[in-house]
Amino acid sequence: MAGTQARGRIDKRAAILAGAFAVFARKGYAAAGVQDIAAEAGVAKPTVYNHLTDKATLFRSALEATARAKLDERIAAIEPLYEPGDDLPGTLGLVGHRLLRVHGDATSCALRRLLYAEVTRFPEALELVSAYGPHRVVRALADPLGRLTLAGRLTATEPALAAEQLMALLVGPMEARSRMGTREVADAEYREVAAAATATFLRAYGPASTGG
């Protein structure tokens, strides 16, 4: 019984955080109300306050939960690089495409827009989101790149720098293409950017004898 109650409380908190993010993304911080969030989450308004004490706490917690979930998706996207098989360029392109899909999805775009809009009101939000953002992704990507270098398949003697450059090649073009997340990007464009990023990356870090 205690375990069921604990699970119910965790599920309700998750629903509140998801509802809060949806409302903040739709209305912005100033226009969002706790009653709106309760309705979105399917709970009573007092329940929201029982789990998260006020609107500012809701905002910070919703940003953190969303950023954490997006980081998990990005790390999962990197997994194929640990066993790339014979086609390293193909695997790099696949990983790049998956990373771009996460970067460009509606939730990730809304997260960035919220951060840009509210960073002066919540300066701590920048550090909060960054804890689960690009720096963590670069660190996660550096590990398989380092392993591939040790295996002689790449020449990335500074894996963290190589990972940072690969992410820049992937993400850099997308802000303009997506008009800062306000335009839906076709999958063909993600594939095009991923292929170009892979080709450029391998020119820099692929073994000269194999081209990757």
Image: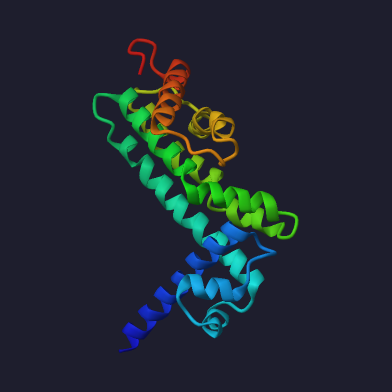
* Image coords of residue 129 (percent x, y): 59, 54
The residue shown at (57%, 72%) is 36
Q: Residue at x 64, y 59 (%)?
A: 28
Nearest the viewer among 169 and 116 is 116
The residue located at (56%, 52%) in the rendering is 111
Is 111 in front, or is 72? 111
Q: Quadrant of residue 59?
A: bottom right
Looking at the rendered image, the quarter that the N terminus falls into is bottom left
Image coordinates of residue 193 in percent, x first then y, are 46, 26
Left or right: 90 as drawn, with respect to 178: left
The answer to whether 166 appears left or right of 29 in the picture is left
Q: Is residue 150 above or below residue 18?
A: above
Q: Residue 180: x and y, percent?
A: 60, 39
Q: Residue furthest right?
A: 120
Of residues 68 and 12, the one drawn nearer to the viewer in this rendering: 12
Residue 83 in picture, x, y percent from top left: 27, 35
The quadrant of the picture occupied by the C terminus is: top left
Q: Height in image: 57 above or below 144? A: below
